[in-house]
Structure formats: structure tokens, C-alpha cells
Image (spheres, rainbow, N blue to C red):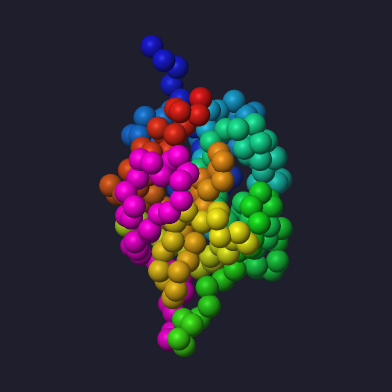
């Protein structure tokens, strides 16, 4: 019988970690909700969910040694799935509650949505609710997803990658917005698959299949 594929769900006090763990379990992974850096190092894959603000999340992860554990796992070639703040922290900095350094694994920054669209119409912030994501690129996880699907968003800040080739999913909210990024063993999304019903299940199933191929 094959050994189950383990996914460390990083628990640093933010986000719906239990909901994410249950969703991963339905997709065939064995989740380990943990704040232990050594458990992150042992897992086949790493999932970083997050709800809250960039500055506090960055500080808390660093204080627990989890930032280095996650980055070491990525450097070792473990598949990484970032959700919401788990996407934003990959970038060089965020401007929520002051400029805060991110991990710098991807070039770019995270900034607040403007209050108006480019045409001057009011833009409601935060972006809350269902919206269609259109995927692009050739990252292997995308092979198991439809070209577009509808996901649930809750965020006031958006990632602005410095390299457009990193963007593998876009959503329209006051103009095109980065909804997913990928590079090598990194895949991260701004939306919440654990709240996105069947679309979220499809994405997590695709993640589980990708983890199996990476083992």
C-alpha cells in the first residue's frame, strides 16, 4: 500500500486552517496542522493559508521560525500551495500597516486596492464574493483545471508581480488583478479554495495530483 502523501498546513494563528485541512483530506492528502518547523520539513508538501494582515503575519511566522521552515521546504523542491496571505508573503514587500518586507521569493509587491477604477468609478474595498478566474500558462498543476472557474475572494490588498510571466490566473475587479501565481514548485492563489465549493475541490484535487507527481 503506498505511503500517504502528507501536507503540512502551517498554523500561525491566522486563517481557517481546520477548514483547509478538511478540504485537503477530501482531495486525498494527509494534512498535518502544525506550528512546528520540523513537521514542515518532513512533509511532502506545504500549504500556507492566511486571513489577516501582511505585517502581523510576517512577524508571527518569523517569531515561530516558520518563515524559514517554509522557505527551506520550497528550496528543497517540496510543492507549496499559498492561499490568500500565503500568496502575498511570497513577494518582496507589502504596504499593509506600513511597508513590511516579505519573503522575496517572487519579485513584486502587495498594495491596497485603489478606491476607484481607472475610469473613476467607485471601487468597493475589500473585494468580497465570487468571481471568475481565468487561468493561463503551462504550470503542471493547471493541466487538471478548467481554463476558468469561479472562486470566493476576501481581500483588500492585491499582489502586483514585477514579472507578468509569474501570473497564471487573473480576475477582473476594477481591472485585471493577479489571482494566481506560479513558479517551479510554487503555486499560490489569492482566493479561498476551502470556501469555493466544487471549484475549490477541483483546485485542491489538482494540487494533490501534482504533489503525487512531484514525489
Position above or below: 120 against 139: below
Is residue 172 or residue 111 the one in the foreground? 172
Q: Which residues are magenta?
A: 121-149
Q: Is residue 65 magenta?
A: no
Position of 173 compared to 166: left or right?
A: left
Kindly give the residue lying farthest to the bottom in the view shown: 120
**Residue at 53%, 36% in the rendered image:** 79
**Location of residue 133 by image quarter:** bottom left
Is residue 201 or residue 13 the one in the foreground? 201
**Location of residue 4 by image quarter:** top left
Position of 101 compared to 209: left or right?
A: right
Residue 151 in picture, x, y percent from top left? 35, 56
Position above or below: 111 against 163: below
Is residue 47 or residue 52 the one in the foreground? 47
**Residue at 48%, 82% in the rendered image:** 118
Residue 142 in picture, x, y percent from top left? 41, 44
**Residue at 47%, 31% in the rendered image:** 211
The reply to whether residue 204 is in sight is no
Q: How many marks?
A: 0
Position of 118 compared to 101: left or right?
A: left
Residue 41 in picture, x, y percent from top left? 62, 29
Position above or below: 21 against 118: above
**Residue at 56%, 46% in the rendered image:** 183
Residue 13 in picture, x, y percent from top left? 56, 47
The reply to whether residue 128 is in sight is yes
Kindly give the residue lying farthest to the left in the view shown: 198
The quarter of the rendered structure image containing the N terminus is top left
Amino acid at each position: 500500500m503506498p505511503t500517504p502523501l502528507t501536507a503540512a498546513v502551517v498554523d500561525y494563528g491566522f486563517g481557517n486552517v481546520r477548514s483547509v485541512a478538511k478540504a485537503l483530506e477530501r482531495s486525498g492528502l494527509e494534512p498535518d496542522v502544525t506550528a512546528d518547523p520540523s513537521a514542515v520539513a518532513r512533509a511532502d508538501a506545504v500549504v500556507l493559508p492566511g486571513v489577516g494582515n501582511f505585517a502581523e503575519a510576517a512577524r508571527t511566522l518569523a517569531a515561530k521560525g516558520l518563515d524559514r521552515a517554509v522557505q527551506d521546504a520550497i528550496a528543497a523542491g517540496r510543492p507549496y500551495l499559498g492561499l490568500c496571505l500565503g500568496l502575498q508573503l511570497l513577494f518582496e514587500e507589502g504596504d499593509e500597516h506600513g511597508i513590511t518586507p516579505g519573503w522575496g521569493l517572487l519579485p513584486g509587491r502587495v498594495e491596497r486596492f485603489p478606491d476607484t477604477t481607472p475610469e473613476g468609478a467607485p471601487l468597493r474595498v475589500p473585494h468580497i464574493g465570487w468571481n471568475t478566474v481565468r487561468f493561463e500558462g503551462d504550470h503542471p498543476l493547471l493541466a487538471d483545471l478548467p481554463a476558468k472557474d469561479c472562486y470566493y475572494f476576501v481581500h483588500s490588498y492585491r499582489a502586483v508581480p514585477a514579472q507578468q510571466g509569474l501570473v497564471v490566473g487573473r480576475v477582473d475587479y476594477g481591472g485585471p488583478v493577479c489571482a494566481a501565481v506560479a513558479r517551479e514548485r510554487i503555486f499560490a492563489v489569492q482566493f479561498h479554495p476551502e470556501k469555493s465549493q466544487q471549484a475549490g475541490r477541483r483546485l485542491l484535487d489538482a494540487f494533490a495530483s501534482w504533489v503525487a507527481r512531484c514525489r
